[in-house]
Amino acid sequence: MKTIFISLCLLMCNIAMQAQMITGVWKGKIGTGLRSQKMEVKLVQKGDSIAGTSYYYENSNHYRRYSVKGYFNQQTNEVVWWDDVLLEQVIPGFRVLSPNETPLLMEADFNCPGGGIMKLDGKAVHKANTKSKGELHLDKVEQTQFDDEWNWVIENYTVGANNPEIIDSIAQLHQPVKEPVVTAAPVPIPRQQEPKPVTEPAVTQQRPSQSIQKADTPVTAPPQNKPTVAVSKPPAIEEKFVQRKKVLTTELPLEGDTIEIHFYDNAEIDGDSISLFMNNKLVFEHVKLSDKPYVVKFAVNELTENNELVMVAENLGAIPPNTSYMIAYINKQRYTANLESTEGSSAMIRFVRRSEK
């Protein structure tokens, strides 16, 4: 029992140390040569998710700033984050080019070569179409070039600022606020009417010959034909799978023993829900996408030569379309793709078994 307790304590300490290492200010470049882009990013870890902000800049007076979201895989030391909301743009005078006009997605490996040096090395791609932007090389630094609301969290991370409520409250400041515009209806002003002359009411006498209906006689309204409203049920997920067009997003090799796939919401966390079909068979449904991975696995020996995995949108969330960021681990190799499903189409990934030579 004592050994188990000590092991748990060591595990918790290791997780806390990793979070402290990832959390901080990172500075470096994307790409090389004349096309390189200077970058500073502030990452704050909360569990296995990441929040913070990124700066693409030429100097302190010329930059674009985004809020960022992402995650950290403690098993592989992989860090993935993406630009979420454009927060600030400072461009002095008139410039044809401005730092990073499109949001990016970063994939990097966290490593410590020694001597207190910490690095994030990987690649940057365009968030919309995964087109390569160049290699990513960042070093952890003590000083930031830009002052913002995350500085206090990073400086006090080990003395209480790692509280998830504090991190969420700062991240919430970066969410786009959409408030309905309420327009009050004009209040009509009654016109003043001139007083009408008062006249005595005329007295009308009932003729004896006129029939009067008795009070106890029931009065029935003429029968009316009520319109019948047909209520149609929403189509089942199998019907959506059949009816919607399948759009091939990427083709991946079928190798090794197991395919492991991670699904994330690739945009604002807005309630996206999906179902997954492998070779025309429903295998997973009601999958809620978030900033935490939803992991599915397939045994390679149970699949055929050519296999199609289709992501069907159960809904479009609050912000259409239904988007997912996918990471597939195949035979110790990592593959990524942005998937998009709508009311008319479904994203498809094809897995093909390579012939052995």
Image (cartoon, rainbow, N blue to C red):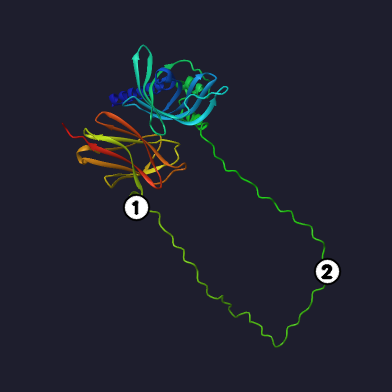
The residue beneath circle 1 is 239
Observer able to see residue 47: no
Is residue 113 placed above or below 105 in the rendered structure? above
The answer to whether marks 1 and 2 mark residues whose Cβ atoms lie closer than 8 Å is no
- Disc 2 residue type (three-letter): Val
Q: Nearer the viewer, mark 1 or mark 2?
A: 1
Residue under the point 75% across and 56% down = 190
| Residue 198 badge | 2
Q: Is residue 224 above or below residue 342?
A: below
Indicate the quadrant where residue 132 lies. Answer: top left
Horizontal placement of 300 versus 16: left or right? left
- Residue 321 in percent (x, y) is at 43, 42
Q: Quadrant of the N terminus?
A: top left
Regarding residue 146, the answer to whether it shows in the image is yes
Residue ranking furthest to the front: 96
Image side of residue 83 versus residue 256, left or right: right
The residue drawn where x is 63% and y is 82% is 214
Q: Which mark is residue 38?
A: none
Q: Amino acid at mark 1?
A: Glu
